[in-house]
Amino acid sequence: MKLSAIVACAGLLIGRTQAWTCLSQADANDIAARSTIFLQHLNVTQANETAQGLFADGIVEYGDSINSLKGDPLGTQVENGKQHYINDTLSTEPIPQINTLNVVAGCNQMVWQWEFLGIGTGEYRISGMTLITVDAGSKIVEQYVEFNSLAWGANIGFNITPSALPGK
Ligand SMILES: *[C@@H]1O[C@H](CO)[C@@H](O)[C@H](O)[C@H]1NC(C)=O
Ligand SMILES: *[C@@H]1O[C@H](CO)[C@@H](O)[C@H](O)[C@H]1NC(C)=O
Ligand SMILES: *[C@@H]1O[C@H](CO)[C@@H](O)[C@H](O)[C@H]1NC(C)=O
């Protein structure tokens, strides 16, 4: 962690027993790598162990791509709490392949750009991004995820018929 980054975050430091430092690129890459192990969950035991150290207890998740896919009203909170989130994720089918396309490290936030391959029929890649917010212990407290849910839906059997765009 760079001194300049530490100084930039000094406002968050006061009163904490453990010094907070901004995410370095390596920290952000590590969070993306552990998120991949969890979301792929090719080995559920390993995914669960990884997730226990990755997420804060009160983690929340938002994102209308998931709401659209599930038929929930836009703006509905997707996940609330670590154990629910872990259970929900680990009870779904494993994701055959997750490729990290880019990781941008901020201070207490990072952006992880990714693609999922092999969902459902696997006909279409699913590309998306997660805006991740971490706490002072670098555990994830919030995720805002958006991706191509139309491609996801098509892969799992939604009957999608494109129509001419209005105004064309
Ligand atoms: C799954 O992960 C656990 C924990 O890391 C490990 O002990 C176990 O051997 C793994 N199972 C397989 C089939 O690789
Ligand atoms: C998660 O799953 C475990 C085992 O299936 C269960 O004991 C626990 O109550 C679940 N927790 C939540 C929050 O759903
Ligand atoms: C994950 O691990 C926790 C803590 O060991 C356990 O309580 C929970 O049941 C596990 N969940 C799953 C889905 O395996």
Image (cartoon, rainbow, N blue to C red):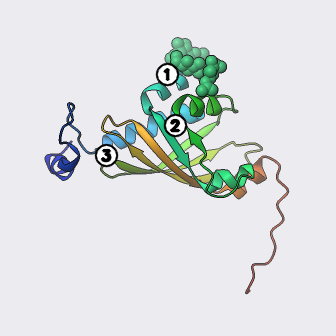
* Residue depicted at 43% across the width and 41% down the height: 141
The residue at label 3 has a CB less than 8 Å from ligand 1: no
Q: CA distance from mark 1 to mark 2?
A: 13 Å
Q: Secondary structure under badge 1? A: helix
Disc with the residue nearer the chain's start (1 vs 2): 2
Report the disc number at residue 49.
1
Report the disc number at residue 25.
3
Q: Amino acid at mark 3?
A: Gln
Q: Is residue 129 left or right of residue 134?
A: right
The residue at label 1 has a CB less than 8 Å from ligand 1: yes
Q: CA distance from mark 3 to mark 2?
A: 16 Å
Q: Which residue occupies the foreground of this view, 9 or 110?
A: 9
Task: State the image coordinates of residue 118 (x, y, percent, origin top left).
Answer: 69, 42
Report the disc number at residue 28.
none
Q: Amino acid at mark 2?
A: Thr
Report the disc number at residue 36.
2
Q: Is residue 63 left or right of residue 52?
A: right
Q: CA distance from mark 1 to mark 3?
A: 23 Å
Q: Secondary structure under badge 3? A: helix
